[in-house]
Amino acid sequence: MIRSETGNYSISTLGGETVKAFIPLSLPPVPPLDLTGSRQRLLERATIAVGRLDSVATLLPDPDLFLYAYVRREAVLSSQIEGTQSSLSDLLLFEIDEVPGVPFDDVVEVSNYIAALNHGMNRLKEGFPLSTRLLREMHAQLMSRGRGSDKNPGEFRRSQNWIGGTRPGNAHFVPPPPHEVDRCMGDLEKFLHDDHSTPLLLKAALAHVQFETIHPFLDGNGRLGRLLIALLLHEGGLLSLPLLYLSLYLKKHRNIYYEKLDIVRTQGDWESWLDFFLEGVEETALGAVETVRRLGALFEKDRKQVQETKRLASNILRVFHEFEKRPILNLKQICRDHRMTFPTATKAVSSLIEMGIIREMTGQKRNRFFVYDAYLKILNEGGDPL
């Protein structure tokens, strides 16, 4: 269904150039979305896939263990869409000890993403609503240090931004003028809480486009807009843990993603975006289910191998459990977390190396780090920088 308009243009002059800033109409779209035929089937399949992910994740012996790793994978992927070159290994090394040698600015961006998500989740647990205030708080975390920390973290923009081009006059897209941002975000918040007729997956799809169109911050809009999807599905009860992240799908189909956003704004074709979004939800949810299954099988296989070890089995198992939680560790961290002596930890790590479960990754005799390769390989799929 093609709508005649999804917004209006504010015409102004900046630097002697005419600038057309787009102000989106409030949600939901008018006329209503066309949810017949294949689109309804897409919605049903996507909803079932999300339900499978939720049920599989809650059956894990330690769901938080999977969440820890999966959130970090998502943080890397989401930041890569914005151009960072950081890898999952960089992030895990940085989190251990802010290790010298990792790309500081890139990995700080990824670390900030995790802080923003954790802040949002903690606030939701406290009963705080998903709101413009919470998004500003999360943005403050997202931009707290590193690149973009000078671009008013936690504050809606007070100047005109643009997407593509070198200035608003030649930009590919110009979001609403700054004096319209508060009103537009207020309307979006009302839609999130007042519209109960739109299925939650569709609400997340619509809200993401609206947020990206408003582009309320000077920087970090893409990452926060993707986080908004996960938080909305969690707050709405579709996922007990925030485990649905579309960054890998959007990274693989980056050009189509931007094209679909443009078609909504220029032609009012929300349905084309919904098809793309729902296909991504189904693919991502089923992919996450498969990742859970593969990690579970890997842990079970390697745990059984450790348990069959006659000598020092209990100590080796304790150390192995640490690698299940974090695939990159050093001896200092193992000793600290388990109150284990250095010689005992060293023997357990050496045994895991002999079994082929972990390996030393630095090639050094001191300040060594060990990696659970098979675990990291599963998490890293699709994680090469663009």
Image (spheres, rainbow, N blue to C red):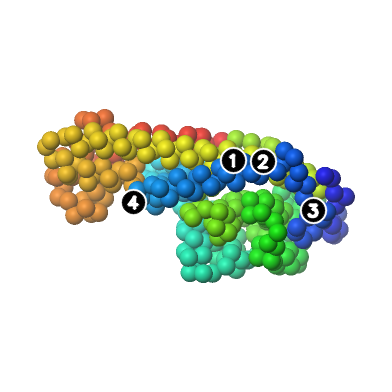
Where residue 89 sits, quadrant-wise, is top left
The earlier-in-sequence mark between 4 and 1 is 4
Asked if one can make out residue 285 in the rendered structure from this viewpoint, the answer is: yes
Verify CB contact (< 8 Å) between mark 3 and mark 4: no
Q: Are marks 1 and 2 in contact (CB under 8 Å)?
A: yes
Structural distance between the alpha carbons of marks 2 and 3 = 17 Å
Q: Nearer the viewer, residue 213 or 69?
A: 69
Q: Is residue 298 above or below residue 54?
A: above
Horizontal side of residue 111 vs 160, given as left or right: left
Closer to viewer: mark 2 or mark 4: 2
Instruction: Report x, y in % for residue 227.
Output: 57, 53
Task: Give the Cα distance between marks 1 and 2.
Answer: 8 Å
Question: Which residue type does callout 1 highlight?
Answer: Glu
Query: Nearer the N terminus, badge 1 or badge 2?
Result: 2
Crowd around label 3: few <14 · some 14–19 · many ≥20 (10 Å) = few
Camera-nearest residue between 355 and 109: 355
Residue where numbered disc 1 is placed: 282
The residue under label 4 is which amino acid type?
Asp
Disc 1 residue crowd, few under 14, some 14–19, many 20+, Cα 10 Å: many
* Spatial CA span between label 3 and label 1: 23 Å
- Upstream in the sequence, badge 2 or badge 3? 3
Horizontal and vertical percent position of residue 293? 42, 37
Q: CA distance from mark 3 to mark 4?
A: 52 Å
Residue labelled with disc 3: 32
Callout 2 amino acid: Leu
Quadrant into which the N terminus falls: top right
Q: Residue at 23%, 33% (x, y): give it.
A: 305
Q: CA distance from mark 2 to mark 4?
A: 45 Å
Q: Residue furthest left?
A: 311
Alpha carbons under labels 4 and 1: distance apart: 37 Å
Which residue is under mark 2?
Answer: 42
Quarter that holds the C terminus:
top right
